[in-house]
Image (spheres, grey):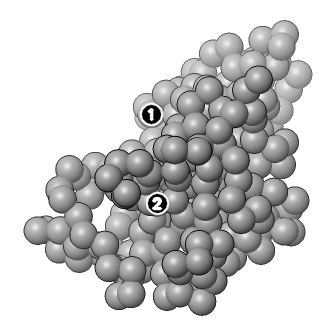
Amino acid sequence: MNADFSPEFQAYGAWIAAAAIQQQDLFNEVVGPDSLQADLNARTLSSDRGVLGDISLLGSFSELDGTWLWGWGNPGFGPEAAAVAPTLVIREFGERHGISEFTTESPDLSGFEQPAQAAIMLAITAGTVLGGRGVWSTAINEGRGHVYLHVGDDQLPQVRFDAIATPRLLMTAVSVFPSDHRQVVRGYFQHFGLRSDEAATAINGTAPDGATVTVDFDEHARIANVAVQPRS
């Protein structure tokens, strides 16, 4: 039997998914394929191209048993470690909103069809609570697991509304969080400041630059079509 995330996690994840995917894509593009070195005490991530600061240890994923372990629950670090302390706001956010994945020391992801992919979803979703600049991961324990770091350096650019990318982002987001397509659209529109109005079968949005987005839904409340009119 396959597991799934809690309804509370899915609701939050759907709300931020499209913008978070766009931001992670930009982060991957900016950071590139360089070999990076993390210093958790200094909270830096270094490469030949320079040094990024304000890194935080989100947690780690074990390929052996399919579990996630938050940095604050890892006895090798704990909540007071320099790179962990900033992540406690994620746990507090989870307590306020009933998101058990953010408050359980070691969520079990082994029942997911793709546990490693679930870990990536958990890391990127959690990273948005810290500002969502980007998540970086690397293999640990000879490939038997991965560690996930949020990188909050102000040097990293933040995405802006991209009308042309909107259909791809929305469709990717609902493939990751399929339970409520409208929630995905509402969250994406709010993130980028689109004025919106809803009808029974569509949500219409107008961006600050004048671009318009119309998202049509089928009889099952799933996205059927995304029409974009860039600013003239």
Q: What percent of the width, then of the height, locates residue 153?
A: 39, 75
**Quarter of the N terminus within the rendering:** top right
Res 182 quadrant in image: top right
Choose between 36 and 113: the one closer to the eye. 113
Mark 2 lies on residue: 148
Q: Amino acid at mark 1?
A: Ala
Q: Is residue 199 above or below residue 23?
A: above
Image point (56%, 31%), residue name: 114
Q: Residues within 10 Å of mark 1 (few under 14, many from 20)?
A: few
Choose between 63 and 176: the one closer to the eye. 63
Does dot 1 land on a helix, a strand or a loop?
loop
> Which mark is drawn over residue 165?
1
Q: Is residue 179 visible?
A: yes
Q: What percent of the width, then of the height, locates residue 190?
A: 69, 51
Does dot 2 land on a helix, a strand or a loop?
strand
Q: Amino acid at mark 2?
A: Tyr
- Residue at the far left in the pictured view: 48
Q: Is residue 211 visible?
A: no
Which of disc 2 and disc 1 is earlier in sequence? 2
